[in-house]
Structure formats: C-alpha cells, structure tokens
Image (cartoon, coloured by chain):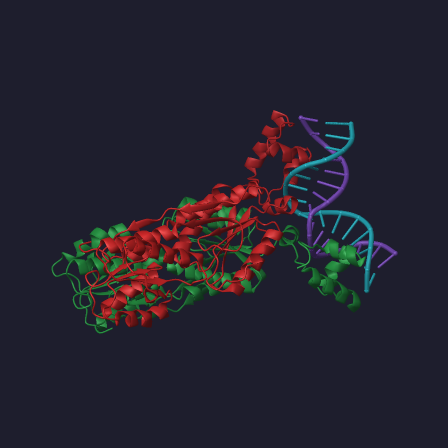
Chain colours: A red, B green, C cyan, D purple
Amino acid sequence: MNKDNVTIKDIARELQISPSTVSRALKDHPDISPETKKLVNNLADKWNYRPNPIALSLKGGASKTLGVVVPEIIHYFFSSVISGIEDHANENGYNIMICQSNEEYEKEVNSIQTLVNSRVDGILISISKLTRNTEHFHELKKKNIPLVFFDRISGEVESDMVIIDDSEGAYMATKHLILEGRKKIVHLSGPPNLIISKDRIEGYIRALNEFQYGVTEENIVKCDQVQEAEWIVPSIMKRTPPPDAFFCVNDFTAAQTLNIVKKLGFHVPDDVAIVGFTNGQLSRLTDPGLSTIDQHGYDMGIEAARLMLDRIRDRKRPYQKRVIKTELVIRGSSVKDR
Amino acid sequence: MNKDNVTIKDIARELQISPSTVSRALKDHPDISPETKKLVNNLADKWNYRPNPIALSLKGGASKTLGVVVPEIIHYFFSSVISGIEDHANENGYNIMICQSNEEYEKEVNSIQTLVNSRVDGILISISKLTRNTEHFHELKKKNIPLVFFDRISGEVESDMVIIDDSEGAYMATKHLILEGRKKIVHLSGPPNLIISKDRIEGYIRALNEFQYGVTEENIVKCDQVQEAEWIVPSIMKRTPPPDAFFCVNDFTAAQTLNIVKKLGFHVPDDVAIVGFTNGQLSRLTDPGLSTIDQHGYDMGIEAARLMLDRIRDRKRPYQKRVIKTELVIRGSSVKDR
DNA sequence: GTGAAAGCGCTAACAG
DNA sequence: CTGTTAGCGCTTTCAC
C-alpha cells in the first residue's frame, strides 16, 4: 500500500540487483538464492507489487482474459452462465470481457472482432438467433483462437462445446404432461435455425411417440417472442377442441402463455397445463408457479470455462462436447394443488 | 483478411520504409507526404491491419477498457445498466470488463483489485448491500483511477455519480396509492445502509405527509429478500386492520408480496394494491400486472459511461451528479380494470 | 519528409 | 547464482 504501480525495476533499483533477478526471484526460480528471494519478496509485499498484465500480454501473447459473447445479458439463463464462467475464470487467474450480440448477426461479428482486437486468449459464445453464416467462427480457428460454444452451438463448426440435454429436457416435460393426463399438447418452439430448438422439438416428438400420441404439424408452432404469443396463443385456443397443455421453449413464453390463457377464461392447470424451460426467477412468481425444466446455467458456465482453459493449455486435444443434465421442476402450472 | 496480426513492422518492411513512418502515416501526421500515406493506408486496409491495443496500453497507459462492478448481473436493472454502459463505451472505442460482487464486501474489494490489476482506465460501480467500508474507493482516488458510482452510491466518497430520483419515484408511487383511495400503505424497504433505501423511504414519507397521513414505524419494514417476504408479509397481513397497499423497494419483492397476499385470500387490487420498483420483464408477467416505477436502467448506463469518458478526458473538472427521471407505470396490481 | 533509437514492464536466452 | 541484452508493438523525440 506504499506506492502505486511498483515495477520490477523499482524493486531492482532499491535492492541494487538486476531486474531479471527480481523477476526470477518472484517466480521462485531455482537459480536464485533463498536470501535474495526473501529480500525481493518482502519488498514486493511491502510495496504491494503487482505484475503488469499488459506487459505480460505484450510479451507472451497471453492476456489472461477470456471473451464471452451472449445474445442478451438480461436473460436469466445467460446471466447464470456468465456467473459460472466468471467464477471459474477468476479462480484460475483469468478475467472475462463480455459482449452482447443483441440477437443480431452483425453485432455478433462486431463483438468477436472487438474481442480479437483486445487479444483475448479465447472466446466463449452462444450464437444469436439470426446467425446463419459461420465465417466469423472459421476466422477464429484460422487465427488459432480457442472457441467454446455453449447452449446455442453452431452445427457447422467443429469446436469444444457444452450444451444441455435439450432433447431429454423436452422429453421429460412432455412426458410429464402426458402422465398428468394431457391429451393435446402444443409445443411453442424457438427459432428453427437454432439446434436447441430442433432438439427440443425432437424430445417433444419422442415423448409423444412413446405414448402413441399423434404428432401433428399444427401442434408445433414457432413462437418465442413477446409479440408473437400475443396473437398466436389466442388463435391456438380457438381450435376445437383447444389444447389442454403447452410446452414452451422458454419460461418467458410460458409465463406469457399462462397469462393469456387465463385471460381467455381458461383455468390453469385444470383446463390447460403449461411447462416452460429455464427455471429462472420468473417461474416462481407467476400464478400458479410455472413448471419448467431447469437448465443449470451456472454449471454450464463452469463447464464451458473449464473446457476453455483445458483448450488453452493443450491446443491439440480432440474437441469435446459436454452435456449438462436438465431437471424437471414441477409447480402449479401443470399439477393441481401445488 | 490476408494475414493475421499484421504489425506496423510488416507494413514497413513490405513498403521498404521505416516503422515510424508507417505509424505516422496511419495517424495522418502532417509531416508525411500524401503519397506515402496513401501507400500505407492502402496496404493497411488490404492486410486488415489492427493496432495492437496491448502495445498501446503499455506505451501510453490507456487500456481503453472500463471496469464495471455490479452486485449481481442477473437482476434486470443491472443488466440494463450494463447494456447502456457497454453501448456508450463501445461507441467510443472502449471495452468493458464486468465483475460481480455478489452483494459481498470482500468480493467487491477483490473485483476492484482485479480491475486495477487489469489496468482499466476507470471503474463504474454500484455498491453491494454489505459494503460499509469505503477504503477501497479512496484507494482508487489515490491511484488516480476515475470512479463513477451508479444507482447504489456511497455517501462518503466524493465522485461522479448517476442516480435516479429515488425519492421522487417513491413519492409518485405512494401518491398514486393514496389517490387510488388507499388508507394504510406499508413500505417494504431495502437495506438501510444504501442511500437508495433511505431516499425511497423519504419519498414515501413525503407523500404521506402531503396528504396528512400518519407515518408509523411499523409501516416501514425492511424486507428485500426472497426468504424474508415469506414470513414478513403474512405477519403484516395479520394486523387488524390489515394494510390495503404495499409499496415495495423492488419488483421482485412486489411480485412475491402479490403472490403471498393472494394466497392468503386477499384480492389484488381490491383488497390490497401493490406497487413495485424497477419495471423489469417480471412486472408484465404477474397476475395482475405489476404497477411499478420505471428506473430507466439503460439510460443510467449511458449517462454513467458518459460521465466516465468525460472524466477520463478531463480529470480536473468538478464532480457531477446526474439524476435520471423515474416514471410511474400503472398496471392491474394497483388499479382495477387493467 | 523520413529514419534511428529509446522506452513502456516484463521475460528469457545467453553469458559469465 | 546473477547480470546483460534483446524484444513483444507501438509512439515519439531527436536527427538528418
């Protein structure tokens, strides 16, 4: 706490030794005598010496910073993942730099450019809804910058990735509705270009098939935006007979569906059961509480960061794909008396 | 797109001129001949040259990175502020590095240390609920690192800051409840060490006084955590007579209060009206919708970043305190037929 | 109008 | 065991 921005030179000067000796002493190099080490370390402590990471970066190329790109930070799920990434990164001496793509392809490309310019040691990304082109990812690989996809992965880029078992989650949700006696289950699905959307549809269909339910196209409706639900849900409820259950691609859509069907005069869960996906803060605060699939975002973040650090240490190892388990959380929107 | 990490040297070598000339040409130095400039710039474009920010930092000391410390990224309000900061920072060639304090003093101090070590050019912070000590902020001032507080400011550190008019927001909320005919309005308040809590209490009291309502201590209850509301709200509703309105320190507490009083058999808004604070996604999804005070988090972020960049440009200017306007948003939790 | 050289803080190869 | 030197990419005096 004595000086600001103490450098190795300062210490060397004070101790009348050379900077390199100080440098070595600080990293406990075997060549250095114990006395010198003690001297150096004591002064370093006293003066509160901190290595300048910028100089380190310039030197070795490692900035000890990881870049993270998410569609939108305000979503509970992404915030949790970020927390996981941050915690694991910090524990290992890394910082993170966060960019948002705002679900836009352009902004995603920009974000990556920004992070590359900042010389991050690797980039963790969950791709935007509007990303179809994958050239920017291939650029990264060409530049030899480690890349880890989480949750919203790209089907066309080989890389490390961590996902949840979306299919299994959707299967559990649908099966739960079936076991609760629901006969006509509509799935409000996500953007078709995202693999998570496809996987969730797949799980939904798998459950239906298992119980010899018919699978009809009209029961799989793309609907994951606030405005969309506003008119899609009422139009679906006008069918004869109306569905008695919704499995929604996220909690947000589910909560909105919940409100809309209630407003239309249906009772939840008696007339209509609803299951969401995420298990965010939201799901506890609707009325009734929202049954949902827990995505364990924090764990996903930890795992993604772990993959990244592994990759930075060993750039040759084969790509890995980690799958985080999902969990069915039952609340009042799908079962009575909860 | 031709090479990776092109340096000034590469360009110099190719053009058979010296690096310094290239450097000057790139920044349009008057000494350099137009032809040379054109030559250099063309090649720079062609090779997609990007200055290495790390080298720049080492040189001049500016890392073009701002540090941001928030209690928790998962809160809608903080996410919005971050978006605002990020947008304004990016527009001006800055990146941001985000740390979470998790509402802990220790983690807050650590985060700041991390950011300082990373040589950020300034730190924007919203302090944690548990921060009482302000030494770490004074350290920053000693180190001459610009500091901007937003939302949760420190009363003991002189600095630039941007807040919302908490008092006014609370006043509007309370007045709204009074005008709706509510007689007994309980305020569920935040941690007493935060200035925002005090200001909201102040606004609440001001409204009560204006309408000759009595102000009683038992109607101001510290309650801003999920677990607390669980028992505090029921105990309050057992009073005779029970209150007919709640003004809550945030949307989260408000939504929970809403659910709890409903579960206790009261009707919202007939028996009990509720107003929250934030206007997050949440407030649209409760049943009924939550009346609340919009905090304009994004605007606050823009303003905070603006203050920071001003400060970086001119370290001598007097400290400024900006106040963001709040706005009453009325939904069904406080008014019938919405 | 352009080049050579030094230096930002640190490390590592090379010498003693 | 310790010091000297060069260099990471860039800017900036100081020369010419």
The residue furthest left is B240
Picture residue at 53% right of the left edge, 65% below the top: A106
Q: At which x and y percent is residue D9? A: 69, 52
Whether residue B53 appears in this view of the structure is yes
Q: At which x and y percent is residue A312? A: 56, 43
Picture residue at 47% right of the left edge, 63% below the top: A102
Asked if residue B319 lies left or right of residue B22, the reply is left
Picture residue at 65% right of the left edge, 44% below the top: A59
- On the image, which quarter does residue A212 sit in? bottom left
Asked if residue B31 lies left or right of residue B174, the reply is right
**Residue A275 versus residue A30 in the image, above or below:** below
Residue toward you, A230 or A194: A194
Residue toward you, A79 or A245: A245
Asked if residue A136 lies left or right of residue A161, the reply is right
**Residue B21 versus residue A238 in the image, above or below:** above
Q: At which x and y percent is residue B163? A: 41, 62
Residue toward you, A294 or B49: A294
Asked if residue B242 lies left or right of residue A229, the reply is left
